[in-house]
């Protein structure tokens, strides 16, 4: 019988993971239990996705705002600027609270009309009406309020982020400015903490060239343990989330070791060579709110070797509409399958692949997993993706 199903995705229920739990065993047993209950089986190259929060919680990778303040005080001599953080209660507010606890003066620079991932600080049409040039104009908090009002809220969260960030000050030690050139911060201090995520390397380079004395990024705060705290050697505070009012959960570390262990365990239990990845935010953009979901530094901080690279696909619609358009259905199916089977051995040309997605496999799979597990109460932090590497020619 001809195959009728391609890729399938299952959210797998799992117990609440706590610090010190055997995550490898939990993941494997959760999937095996689901297979028995739902009457399905694993295949080679199935993909097991585990949300990053499970890994971080099992590792106990947490830190407090006091740890943040301690690390900042040993890295900055005096008052410092914080440039271009995202607007988020979950992602940045607790970090800023820790920065303010340092006791140093903080010059906080926010990008406008939106932050790096698309959260808006103002109505862009009103910005145009006011003849504000985002490439050159710098606004103080007072100027921002005089132009846009005392209560400018995010359309989704209802939060006035400028007010919220200002209210985190300790003894009024936060001044807020809106600008898009990081060099503006150097008018106030030569010490800068770069807080943007995906453009951080460029921002650091610009500041260094402009004469900044001390430059650190959020990826360099808590990149080693402070007084026994959690840490992330590669990403520091990037990818962290609020855990409590005084504690953050850091992005997990050593993820390659975790996924390799899970892969070996599945091989021992089932005889199948599955792929495994840890995933965080998916890399997709909301068409209405214009928010780019990816607030983590990467979609996947760790994955097995079989998930490296980009897809090798041809565009079925293009082949069907051009090379095979005059054939009958059965002849078209046969030749289409032959074309797919031959794709690894010939130069298909740009037209045949036009419109396929030249993105990393882990970014595509991580987005699929993130949409499946969600960020709320679904209770499925493990995702099983089957048939992802199959195609029209797979029997």
Image (spheres, helix red, strand yellow):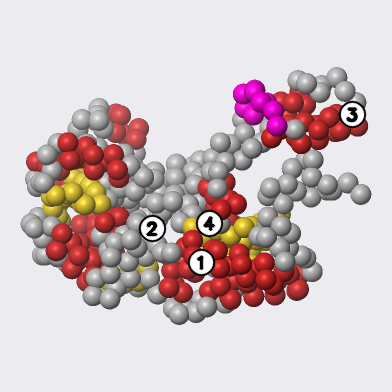
Residue that label 1 marks: 258
| Figure check: 234 above or below 224 | above
Spot occupied by residue 197 in the image (x, y as percentages of width and height): 34, 48
Label 1, secondary structure: give it: helix
Q: CA distance from mark 3 to mark 1?
A: 47 Å
Q: Are marks 3 and 4 in contact (CB under 8 Å)?
A: no
- x 53%, y 74%: residue: 23
Name the image quarter holding residue 246. Answer: bottom left
Q: Are marks 4 and 1 in contact (CB under 8 Å)?
A: no
Residue that label 2 marks: 239
Q: Earlier in the sequence, mark 2 or mark 3?
A: 2
**Which span is picked out in magenta?**
345-354
Per the rendering, the mark at residue 303 is: 4
Spot occupied by residue 245 in the image (x, y as percentages of width and height): 31, 72
Label 2, secondary structure: give it: loop
- x 92%, y 49%: residue: 1
Q: Earlier in the sequence, mark 2 or mark 4?
A: 2
Residue 289 visible in rendering: no
Residue 99 appears left or right of 381: left
Residue 47 appears left or right of 243: right
The answer to which of 210 and 259 lies nearer the viewer is 259
Residue 305 visible in rendering: yes
Q: Are marks 2 and 3 in contact (CB under 8 Å)?
A: no
Per the rendering, the mark at residue 331 is: 3
């Amino acid at each position: 019988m001809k195959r009728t199903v391609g890729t399938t995705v299952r959210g797998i229920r799992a117990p609440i993971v706590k610090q010190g739990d055997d995550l490898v065993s939990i993941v494997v047993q959760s999937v095996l239990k689901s297979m028995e209950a739902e009457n399905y089986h694993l295949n080679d190259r199935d993909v097991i996705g585990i949300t990053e929060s499970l890994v971080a919680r099992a590792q106990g990778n947490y830190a407090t705002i006091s740890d943040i303040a301690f690390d900042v005080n040993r890295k900055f001599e005096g008052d410092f600027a914080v440039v271009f953080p995202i607007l988020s209660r979950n992602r940045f507010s607790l970090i800023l609270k820790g920065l303010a606890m340092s006791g140093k003066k903080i010059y906080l620079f926010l990008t406008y009309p939106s932050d790096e991932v698309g959260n808006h600080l103002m109505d862009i049409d009103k910005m145009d009406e006011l003849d504000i040039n985002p490439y050159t104009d710098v606004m103080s908090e007072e100027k921002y309020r005089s132009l846009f009002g005392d209560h400018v809220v995010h359309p989704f969260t209802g939060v006035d982020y400028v007010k919220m960030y200002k209210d985190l000050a300790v003894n009024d030690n936060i001044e807020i400015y809106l600008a898009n050139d990081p060099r503006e911060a150097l008018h106030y201090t030569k010490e800068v903490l770069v807080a943007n995520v995906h453009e951080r390397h460029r921002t650091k380079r610009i500041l260094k060239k402009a004469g900044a004395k001390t430059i650190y990024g959020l990826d360099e705060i808590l990149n080693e343990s402070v007084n026994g705290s959690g840490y992330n050697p590669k990403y520091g505070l990037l990818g962290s989330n609020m855990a409590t009012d005084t504690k953050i959960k850091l992005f997990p570390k050593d993820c390659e070791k975790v996924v390799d262990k899970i892969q070996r365990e599945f091989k021992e239990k089932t005889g199948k060579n599955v792929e495994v990845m840890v995933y965080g935010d998916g890399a997709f953009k909301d068409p209405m709110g214009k928010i780019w979901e990816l607030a983590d530094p990467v979609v996947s901080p760790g994955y097995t070797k079989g998930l490296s690279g980009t897809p090798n696909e041809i565009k079925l619609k293009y082949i069907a509409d051009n090379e095979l358009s005059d054939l009958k259905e059965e002849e078209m199916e046969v030749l289409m399958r032959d074309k797919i089977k031959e794709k690894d051995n010939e130069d298909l040309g740009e037209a045949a692949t036009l419109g396929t997605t030249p993105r990393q496999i882990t970014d595509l799979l991580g987005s699929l997993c993130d949409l499946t597990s969600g960020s709320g109460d679904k209770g499925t932090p493990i995702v099983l993706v089957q048939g992802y590497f199959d195609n029209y020619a797979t029997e």
